Image (tube, helix red, strand yellow):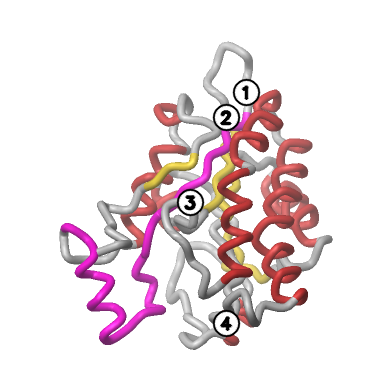
Amino acid sequence: MAGRLYDLGATVFATGFAPHDAEMPWGEQPLGSLPFAVHHHNLEDATTPTALIDEVVQQHGRIDIVAAVHARSGAAVGLDAVTADDLDRCWAANVRSIVLLAQRFAAVHQPALADQPPSGRLLWFTSGQHLGPMDDEIDYAISKGALHQMTASIDHAVSARRIVANCINPGPVDTGYATGDTHAAVAEMFPDGRWGLPDDVANLVGFLVSDEGAWIRGQVLNSEGGFNRFG
């Protein structure tokens, strides 16, 4: 997605948090050679979202797009085992950080003139919990559900600053976390027999950040390639 925005002419400030990936079964995933730096920010820290927006503005003079694809995913924990710490950490990383990013983005964004298309874009990602349950990872599912439900409110709040906000549900995307039988079984749940790809997500993001995509606002967009979660 960052590569697509770069190819479209954006100045990209990319960031991630490798220690989280190191905790996961798939481990750290080097991003390879990129034409821009990948920075390091822990969005679970309440002070980081505002500092991150300010860092971008300090380096580049302005900010027009915030694409928040990050998420904390804990261990597979159901209702009987989830803890307050699990819930708090997912809330902090997955929801609170995006609200604070939106708050600071709206405060510093240089809005377009009234006779021009909105120049700001704010995007975040949910995971389809509104279409089917995910009770085997209750802390993650609840936080992603909050992202779905806050979309219209956040979009309305930032609209006065000429920012358009939307939420994307991309369905299962093959980023390397699933292998073997699991990977094959999920592929069979798509009409085309394949997972969604990062490029499929980037196609939608590229449209939404364009002038042509400015009329779509405050929406949760299901872009799942016909995924049949009940198949």
Q: Answer with the quarter of the image where residue 85 lies.
A: bottom right
Q: CA distance from mark 2 to mark 3?
A: 30 Å
Image quarter in which the N terminus is found: bottom left
Position above or below: 149 against 200: above
Mark 2 or 4, which is nearer the eye? 4
Mark 2 or 3, which is nearer the eye? 3
Q: What stretch of residues is rendered in magenta? A: 163-191
Mark 1 or 3, which is nearer the eye? 3
Residue under circle 1? 112
Residue at 53% from the left image edge and 40% from the top image edge:
166
Q: Across the whole image, how many numbered discs are drawn on residues?
A: 4
Foreground residue, 137 or 174? 137
Q: CA distance from mark 1 to mark 2?
A: 5 Å
Q: Pointers 1 and 2 in contact (CB under 8 A)? A: yes
Residue under circle 3? 130
Nearest to N terminus: mark 1 or mark 2: 1
Q: In the image, residue 135 lies at what x, y percent?
A: 52, 69
Within 10 Å of disc 2 (Cα), the crowding (few <14, some 14-19, many 20+) is: many
Q: CA distance from mark 1 to mark 4?
A: 43 Å
Residue at 57% from the left image edge and 77% from the top image edge:
78
Nearest to N terminus: mark 3 or mark 4: 4
Position above or below: 110 against 27: above
Residue under circle 2? 119
The label number, if any, that marks residue 215 in the structure image: none
Identified by mark 3, the residue type is: His
